[in-house]
Image (cartoon, rainbow, N blue to C red):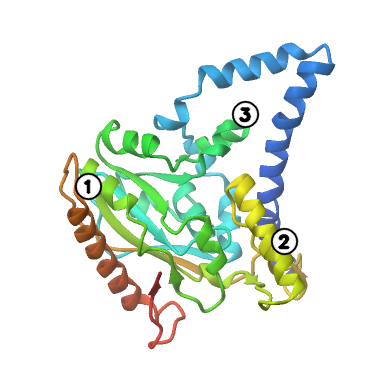
Amino acid sequence: MAFLSRLDLHECLQTLSVLQWLPVYVFLGAIPIILIPYFLMFTKFWILSVLALTWLAYDWNTHSQGGRRSAWVRNWTLWKYFQNYFPIKLVKTHDISPEHNYIIANHPHGIVSYGVFINFATEASGFSRIFPGITPSVGTLEGIFWIPIVREYVMSMGVCPVSKLALKYLLTQKGSGNAVVIVVGGAAEALLCQPGASTIYLKDRKGFVKLALKTGAYLVPSYSFGENEVHNQETFPEGTWIRFFQKTFQDTFKKILGLNFCTFHGRGFTRESWGFLPFNLPITTVVGEPLPIPRIKKPNKKTVDKYHALYISALRKLFDQHKVQYGFPEAQELTII
């Protein structure tokens, strides 16, 4: 019975580690957004708001110049519980030399990109052990770095804006051994997320290839098998009033905040219940072979298209080599739109 109790406690801690994720971000974001204007206008503590805004202005460029990562935060035990909840695994197929810089392109986005977060923004999967000498930086929306407290938290994990300025700085001004991680399909790809699906946005996504050519960074394909399985997404039938409401809300949300709103669900606090936690299903991020890229100051469209096609070929090869091992049928194909 004592053993069973320990198992129950262990599973409870794993669930709580995932459950805290969104509330922590909302809470950390709400504090400065609400309290800074309130203190500034309605209380005698206005000096705190002034100090916070002064620091933000003074430190404004840090997130675009390598950030301020913390090995301590990346190694929190919390992330290990988070990883084991699914579980999440990082698989290396080829060595990555610290003598070069890299753009690790990841697919698919899924609802939340759990695989990218745990494998590259924390040390739960042992990134530094698997890829010694490589420093990963995960690209995300720049708006997050406009929020005091939140920006410090995400920078500590090695997260950076997915902007040309920030990515180019990491790939050209920080020496070698740097890898920026980009989920190429972006938040729009979340709307394609369905269990069993392997559809990604890539056909017209060429900015990351152009960046690789301008900086000479090698391109590395990666695919997170199982990312689409951990939530069920509801897309209501066309022509129904609920689909009209869903699409209107999604379009409005996208226009105002630049985000795609997904109607999804998963499990609740217990495995058998309904809720919004992800299902306990494995996610395996497989990192492929680096594709050498020449450095060209002003690459033309023909050159970009050439290396984009080479990247797609490498990604398809990676997917086909590992799909059966990680849950897809042999006949499954990677669909690129």
- The label nearer to you, 1 versus 3, is 1
Residue located farthest toward the front when viewing the structure as drawn: 239
- The residue closer to the viewer here, 113 or 72, is 113
Residue type beneath disc 2 = Cys
Percent coordinates x, y for residue 272 in the rendering: 75, 76
Q: Is residue 74 depicted above or below 246 in this figure?
A: above
Residue type beneath disc 1 = Leu
Q: Specify the label residue 12 is tagged with.
A: 2
Residue placed under numbered mark 1 in the picture: 213
Percent coordinates x, y for residue 82 in the rendering: 60, 56
In whole angstroms, how far apart are the C-alphas of marks 3 and 2? 31 Å
Residue ID at (71%, 31%): 33
Label 1 crowd bin: few (<14), some (14–19), many (20+), radius 10 Å: many
Residue ID at (22%, 64%): 310
Give SS at disc 2.
helix
- The label nearer to you, 1 versus 2, is 1
Residue placed under numbered mark 3 in the picture: 148
Residue type beneath disc 3 = Pro
Between discs 3 and 2, the one toward the N terminus:
2
Q: Is residue 59 visible?
A: yes
Give SS at disc 3.
loop
Label 2 crowd bin: few (<14), some (14–19), many (20+), radius 10 Å: some
Q: Is residue 204 left or right of residue 69?
A: left
- Residues tagged 3 and 2 counted as in contact (Cβ below 8 A): no
Quarter holding residue 85: bottom right
Q: Is residue 126 left or right of residue 291?
A: right
Quadrant location of the N terminus?
bottom right
